[in-house]
Image: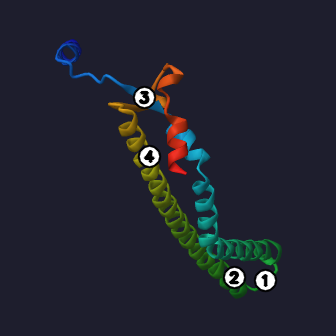
Amino acid sequence: MKKLLCAAGVSIALAMSAGAYAEKIAIVNVGEIFQNMPAREAVAKQLESEFKSRATELQNLEKDLQTRVEKLRRDGATMKQSEREKLESELMTKRDQFAEKAQKFEEDNRRRQGEERTKILTRIQNSIKSVAAKEGYDVVIDANAVAYAKDSVDITSQVQKQVK
């Protein structure tokens, strides 16, 4: 472990003495930009609309399951054996259908959210690159990874203006 730390320290020292360090560094709060983007809310509404019919179908299936479970609890003791077995079988089938559809819904919803989040983050990243190039920054670091920085090196507001 000590050898690794020493090697890293020597590498940093050599890089700095060779002038390989960045001269102009900025920070940007990507999370803040993401949260404040109007496109994020529009995408959320679009996804809600896209998945609304499937969510409604799942809710209806869940209600149907609850109704059947309640009927089995309430009337199970007084039902004929064949009726109870039929209801239990239907209940198991419906439960399995619900579980399968709910899992597929969650997977599809998560995938689509990821796709849309990636699109937004790509827009933010492109804006960061543009502002950095225009202002001559060599390195831009996410503000969440920095313990302290002067306000003068924070380009968050510039990136927010460009990304809209």
Nearer to us: label 3 or label 1: 3
Question: Mark 3 Cα within 10 Å, few/some/many (few <14, many 20+)?
Answer: many
Mark 1 or mark 2: whose residue is earlier in sequence = 1
Q: Residues within 10 Å of mark 4 (few under 14, many from 20)?
A: some
Residue 26 percent across, percent down from the top left: 42, 28
Nearer-N-terminus badge (2/3): 3
In-front residue for pair 69/159: 159
Quadrant, the N terminus: top left
Camera-nearest label, 2 or 3: 3
> Badge 3 is on which residue?
26
Q: Which residue is mark 4?
A: 127
Which of pointers 3 and 1 lies earlier in the amino acid sequence?
Answer: 3
Q: Are marks 1 and 2 in contact (CB under 8 Å)?
A: yes
In this rendered view, identify the residue nearer to me: 21 or 119.
Answer: 21
Disc 2 to disc 3: CB gap under 8 Å: no
User: Is there CB contact under 8 Å for labels 4 and 1?
Assistant: no
Q: Position of residue 155 (x, y in %)?
A: 49, 33
Q: Amino acid at mark 1?
A: Met
**Element marked by disc 3:** strand
Q: Nearer the viewer, mark 4 or mark 1?
A: 4
Name the disc covering residue 87, or none: 2
* Amino acid type of the residue that numbered disc 4 sits on in the rendered structure: Ser
Q: Give the distance between the C-alpha atoms of the residues marked 2 and 3, in whole angstroms.
A: 66 Å
The residue type indicated by label 2 comes to Leu
